[in-house]
Image (cartoon, rainbow, N blue to C red):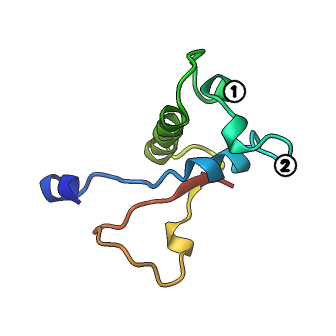
């Protein structure tokens, strides 16, 4: 909200990193998000560093922002699909996910 007060047109997207891991097919029943590391995301993020789960999730947040800015093929903004959404942001944030 503070950033929107400074610049009303700045795009914002939510990341939902654990849901994203399932949607991109890296997380599955035998390999849950807590067992996925940044190095496992080589298709999307180039890094071999061992980082915390929070840092991995921040990198996934950057991936969703990249998808939003560059309108990556196969990625969509799910916010317009929300039923009666509530947000303090105007314009509302996006929920960019690969579908």
Residue 94 appears in the figure: yes
Q: Residues within 10 Å of mark 2 (few under 14, many from 20)?
A: few
Going by the image, does 59 lie left or right of 21?
A: left
Identify the element where label 2 is drawn. loop
Q: Residue at x 80, y 40 (%)?
A: 31
Of all residues, the one furthest to the top in this rendering is 48
Of all residues, the one furthest to the left in this rendering is 6
| 82 in relation to 63, above or below | below
The residue where tag 2 is placed is 29
Q: Where, quadrant-wise, is the N terminus in this rendering? A: bottom left
Badge 1 or badge 2: first in the primary sequence: 2
Of all residues, the one furthest to the right in this rendering is 30
Q: Residue at x 45, y 60 (%)?
A: 94
Identify the element where label 1 is drawn. helix
Q: Residue at x 36, y 73 (%)?
A: 87
Q: Position of residue 64 (x, y in %)?
A: 51, 45
Q: Nearer the viewer, residue 71 or 3?
A: 3
Instruction: Single out the mark in the foreground, 1 or 2.
Output: 2
Residue 75 appears in the figure: no
Q: CA distance from mark 1 to mark 2?
A: 16 Å
The residue where tag 1 is placed is 40
What number of labels is visible?
2
Q: Residues within 10 Å of mark 1 (few under 14, many from 20)?
A: some
Q: Nearer the viewer, residue 29 or 46?
A: 29
Going by the image, does 58 lie left or right of 28?
A: left
Q: Position of residue 74 (x, y in %)?
A: 66, 49
| 78 in relation to 45, above or below | below
Q: Nearer the viewer, residue 12 or 57?
A: 57
Q: Position of residue 45 (x, y in %)?
A: 58, 26
| 88 in relation to 26, above or below | below
Q: Where, quadrant-wise, is the C terminus in this rendering? A: bottom right
């Amino acid at each position: 909200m503070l950033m929107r007060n400074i610049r009303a047109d700045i795009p914002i997207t939510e990341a939902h990193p654990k849901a994203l891991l399932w949607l991109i097919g890296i997380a599955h029943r035998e390999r849950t998000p807590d067992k996925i590391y940044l190095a496992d995301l080589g298709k999307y993020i180039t890094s071999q560093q061992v980082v915390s789960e929070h840092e991995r999730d921040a990198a996934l947040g950057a991936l969703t922002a990249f998808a939003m800015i560059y309108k990556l093929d196969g990625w969509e903004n799910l916010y317009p699909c929300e039923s009666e959404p509530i947000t303090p942001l105007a314009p509302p944030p996006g929920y960019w996910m690969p579908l």
